[in-house]
Amino acid sequence: MTKKFIPCIYLYHEHAVKGLHDTTIVETDPLRLVQIYNENNADELIVFDMSKTDEEHERALDIIKEICEVAEMDVFGTGNIKRMEDVKKLLYAGCKKAILDYENPLNIEITEEVSLKFGKDKILASVDHDEIVTKEKALLEKYVSCLILLNPHIIRETMSQTQLPVIVQINQIALNKLLEIFAHETVCGITGNTINDNVNEIPSLKKLCKENNIPIQSFDAAFNWSDFKKNSDGLVPVIVQDYRTSQVLMMAYMNEESYKLTLETGKMNYYSRSRQSLWLKGETSGHFQYVKSLSADCDMDTILAKVSQIGAACHTGSRSCFFNEITKKEYEESTNPLQVFEEVFSVIKDRKVNPKEGSYTNYLFDKGIDKILKKLGEEATEIVIAAKNPNPNEIKYEISDFLYHMMVLMAEKNITWEDITTELANR
């Protein structure tokens, strides 16, 4: 079973605090913590929503959404869950999984319902006493995929009751003791302040685990460096592509050491021919490239890297290094659906910020949400009417009108196409 290092954020009044029972502020901006966790190759992230009121909870969900957008690892959300709707909100905010608090009887009651609705793999449960595991064993094993042990002293007792994977929250322990915790067969992760306070040690702890034959989450390469055909300088060119948009961002070179570092750290490392030294992309600018996949071409002499690019790839500040057009023959751009949606949506968003006289889009924004919703409803009805007619062109026109008005609504409510496509991909 792969062992994971899982930092957590205890979210209280929009700040990150020390723990569930200690509201001392450790960071006023939780997103800064996420950046640190990204840079240190954390495997997953747990966010505890410690809000008390509905208003605080809604603001916490907004922050959790922002956390999910910038985190390079899966985010699990928990806290202030009273009904199925609260689980849905966490998942819709971008959390890969939701954690039910088994100290709260309401969470026990909704376990079956939310598991059947969203899938067992989306639901975890946190427990503080092994008696709960004993009492609710059948429910947990049928509807929950993993346990979060808030008390590290109940590992053995829990293992005697169930073979469910467990993540252990540990707040104080010597780092060398982590290997002993990981030695337990069903322990799949460690979270808590032991990880939070030593996040910079995650890379070295992973290396230590590997040396002790403890399986960790890492990039295992199908090819050794010796399998590649190198150029006359012993290097291999790397083409870098945005994993979301497929935009080509840059081209650089790797030597053996940078190749191994890339696999080890999950961040793109290169060899600079001009400086004749290793180069971690983003080390000085903060514009890191997080590896999503590496592929070799048919001749094994070029690498294609798909990455999550932070900021700009080019040293000029441009998103891509390829912006100097040499020549161009007029041609019709490919109608990539998402690209078309993004281009139209960009115009709509620009109209909102920079109004244009006579613009129908600005007319809708000026009239407000009720007008936008009225038009959206009208266009939906037009689709239904058009669908009853034999001519397919009519429904094509009506769907186009509907999508335009839908994008106006998206701009009004600050929802992006990435929000929509991510949600669809998660279903």
Image (cartoon, rainbow, N blue to C red):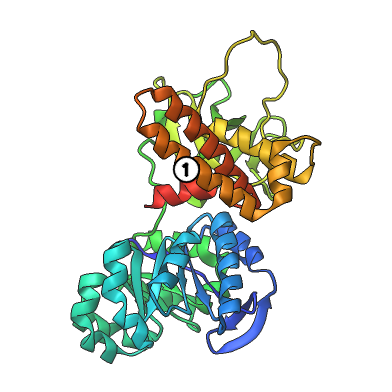
Q: Nearer the viewer, residue 221 or 26?
A: 26
Label 1 crowd bin: few (<14), some (14–19), many (20+), radius 10 Å: some
Q: Is residue 376 above or below residue 18?
A: above
Q: Position of residue 11 (x, y in %)?
A: 58, 76
Rendered residue at 70%/35% (across/down) = 314
Q: Position of residue 36 (x, y in %)?
A: 61, 62
Location of mark 1 (residue): 380
Q: Is residue 20 left or right of residue 138?
A: right
Q: Is residue 416 visible?
A: no
Q: Nearer the viewer, residue 404 or 178?
A: 404
Q: Is residue 321 visible?
A: yes
Three-letter amino acid code at disc 1?
Ala
The quarter holding residue 117 reads: bottom left
Q: How many labels were placed on the picture?
A: 1
Instruction: Give the SS element for disc 1.
Output: helix
Q: Nearer the viewer, residue 390 or 119?
A: 390
Rendered residue at 59%/65% (across/down) = 62
The quarter holding residue 385 reads: top left
